[in-house]
Amino acid sequence: MPKKKGKKKKVWKEPQYVAPFGFRADDMVITPLGVVVTVMGTRFDGPWQPDPKKAPDAEPDFSNARLIMRYPNGYEHVLAPRPLPLEPLTVFGYKRAGEALHVLRDVEGWKTERAKMEKEWERHEMTMRLRTEALNLEGTARKGKGGKSPKKLRPVTAAPAGPGQAVGGRGVTK
């Protein structure tokens, strides 16, 4: 018999839900064993769930709140709920990583985004180059058959089209 999949609980990243644990969402935290993890947010397992639309000023019930952390290998770990009153996790050996690690993480993220964008740009440039060459070859083939020479074609050097935008014309000059 297959396992039943339940509804996935929402992870709250707002500061008022994560701050009682002593951290913020997307903070890098060093565990007592020395592993650097990222705070994903807070999940509420009991009947009380935050609802900013119905009761924006409602006091959160942290008796069933759990902090969710993501390990470097992608595994998300849910910390067990703690008894009230909440104390920061620094009491239990968790500590926020230094700003240098946060900056390095952000720089690595920007580098990977930049590499993706450059690869996409190179792919687009190659596509446009091939299209231009095909149009030029089409023009020389018509010209060689003894007919009228076609309009001159110029290379198209346009920025890549965004989502929902069409790529500009064929590069025909009059």
Image (cartoon, helix red, strand yellow):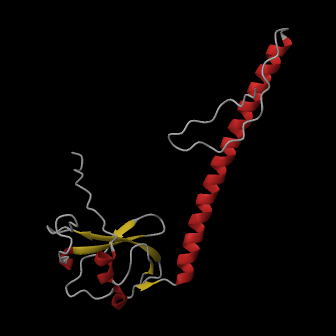
| Residue closest to the eye, 74 or 153 | 153
Tell me the quadrant of the picture where the N terminus can be found.
top left
| 95 sits to left or right of 63 | right
x, y percentage for residue 84? Answer: 19, 85
| Residue closest to the eye, 12 or 90 | 12
| Residue closest to the eye, 169 or 47 | 169
Extreme-top residue of the structure: 146
| Relative vertical location of residue 43 with respect to residue 166 in this rendering, above or below | below
Q: How many marks?
A: 0
| 53 sits to left or right of 126 | left
> Quadrant of the rendered structure where residue 33 is?
bottom left
Q: Residue at the spot x=22%, y=54% of the render?
A: 6
Q: Residue at the spot x=24%, y=52% of the render?
A: 5
x, y percentage for residue 2? Answer: 24, 46
| Residue closest to the eye, 98 or 133 | 133
x, y percentage for residue 163? Answer: 51, 43
Extreme-bottom residue of the structure: 91
Tell me the quadrant of the picture where the C terminus can be found.
top right
| 22 sits to left or right of 71 | left
| Relative vertical location of residue 120 with respect to residue 135 in this rendering, above or below | below
Extreme-front residue of the structure: 174
Q: Residue at the spot x=81%, y=16% of the render?
A: 141
x, y percentage for residue 117? Answer: 62, 53
| 10 sits to left or right of 153 | left
